[in-house]
Every structure is written in C-alpha cells, then in structure tokens.
Image (cartoon, rainbow, N blue to C red):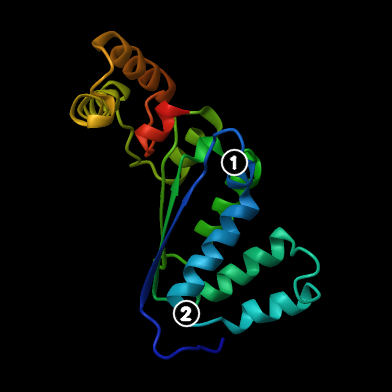
C-alpha cells in the first residue's frame, strides 16, 4: 500500500460514540462506525490513502454507497500503515445493529494480534457482555453506584456553581439532578448540561 503525505506515525487513535438519542440513528449503525474510523485514520495517515481513492472510484465516483464489506476492507488496508492502532468504542449497547457490531469486533480482533488495541464500554446487556467476557476474561466492570456518585457530584457542581442556574430553587435543581441520574443507568454520558436542561 502506497503512503502519501510524508512519513506516517507508527501509531494512531480513533474514537466512536454510539449515540442512542432520538434523531441520531446514523450514529447507532455499524457502517457509520467504520466510516468514522476511516475518516479519522485517514487524517492521521497524512493524506488520502490510495485505497480510499480506489473505493471512491469503484462507487461511481461517489454516486453509489459502498457496501459494509468494502468499507471494512478499506479500513483494514489503511490500518496497515500503522504499527499500533488504538480504537475506543463508547456505549456499545446503544448500537442498533448488535449482531453486526459483534461480528465486526470479532473480525477486527482476529485481524492482527499485537497491532490492534481495542477498548469498548457498554452497559451490562447480556449479548454484548457475554461476547466481551469471552474476548477478555480480565474485563473491568464498574460498579453502578460509584459511577452514579461521580455523575451526581458533577451535576451538583454545575447546578450550584453556574450562574445560569442561580435563579432556580433547590427543588427544581433536585428534580433535574434526579432525572439525569435516572436516565444514565450507570453510564456516564458527556453532554452539555445547559443544552440538556434547556431543551
């Protein structure tokens, strides 16, 4: 595979968040994950990889969408440019295509031992948890009460230290805090608290 744009770094990192909110369906699908990884790793690559240009032309210069298989193959060829690849997948349980996601993870983890470093987070839903346990018996399960404690401290600090909320009484603030904690289900969701509340 040809390299473009000078010397490539020996390692690269990419992150993808499966966004389970309404209206974010495109961020809950496996093809969106692969597309995002291609974009991120191509940027680190130092130019447009030859294989990506070939994929574009094979899809009638962008006139038709590529298949998941061709996207996956393109991603793997791009990753060959790096000695170490780090991928962080956040909120696996929010993926709308669980079976396809697990299959993709299986394909990735069987790709190159020692080259791929994969970190995934998920609520303890059975299908994902079962597979991740088989993949890594040393997985870490974070205790929900500890996570909620951290979230509660964060929300409390925003509600009581940000001037935007100073005109709200303690009862309203407590209702907001409790509702946000109820919706987290043991997962920390990075969000703009002001935006969440104002909506």
Q: Which mark is residue 81?
A: 2
- The answer to which quarter of the image holds residue 142 is top left
Q: Residue at x 58, y 40 (%)?
A: 95
> Residue 184: percent from the left, percent from the top?
40, 25
- The answer to which quarter of the image holds residue 121 is top left
> Residue 196: percent from the left, percent from the top?
42, 30
Q: Is residue 176 left or right of residue 55?
A: left
For label 1, the residue is 24
Q: Which mark is residue 150?
A: none
126 relative to 191, above or below: above
> Residue 93: percent from the left, percent from the top?
52, 35
Task: Answer few, some or many: residues within 10 Å of disc 1's Cα (few below 14, many 20 plus, some between 14 and 19).
Answer: few
User: Which numbered disc flags the more N-terminal residue, 1 or 2?
Assistant: 1
Question: 62 and 112: which one is in front?
Answer: 62
Task: Answer few, some or many: residues within 10 Å of disc 2's Cα (few below 14, many 20 plus, some between 14 and 19).
Answer: many
Q: Residue at x 47, y 34 (%)?
A: 129
Q: Is residue 67 left or right of residue 151?
A: right
76 relative to 3, above or below: above
SS for callout 2: loop
Q: Residue at x 63, y 80 (%)?
A: 51
- The answer to which quarter of the image holds residue 158 is top left
């Amino acid at each position: 595979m040809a390299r473009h744009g000078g010397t490539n770094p020996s390692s690269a990192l990419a992150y993808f968040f499966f966004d389970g909110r309404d209206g974010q369906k495109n961020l809950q699908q496996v093809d969106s994950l692969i597309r995002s990884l291609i974009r991120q790793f191509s940027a680190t690559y130092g130019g447009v990889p030859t294989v990506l240009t070939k994929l574009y032309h094979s899809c009638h210069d962008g006139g038709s969408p590529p298949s998941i298989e061709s996207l996956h193959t393109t991603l793997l060829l791009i990753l060959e440019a790096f000695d170490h690849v780090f991928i962080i997948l956040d909120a696996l349980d929010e993926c709308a295509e669980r079976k396809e996601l697990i299959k993709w993870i299986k394909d990735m983890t069987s790709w190159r031992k020692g080259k791929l470093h994969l970190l995934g987070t998920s609520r303890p839903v059975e299908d994902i948890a079962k597979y991740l346990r088989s993949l890594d018996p040393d997985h870490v399960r974070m205790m929900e009460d500890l996570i909620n404690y951290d979230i509660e401290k964060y929300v409390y600090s925003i509600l009581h230290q940000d001037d935007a909320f100073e005109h709200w009484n303690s009862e309203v603030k407590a209702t907001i805090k409790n509702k946000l904690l109820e919706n987290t289900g043991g997962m920390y969701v990075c969000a703009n608290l002001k935006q969440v509340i104002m909506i």
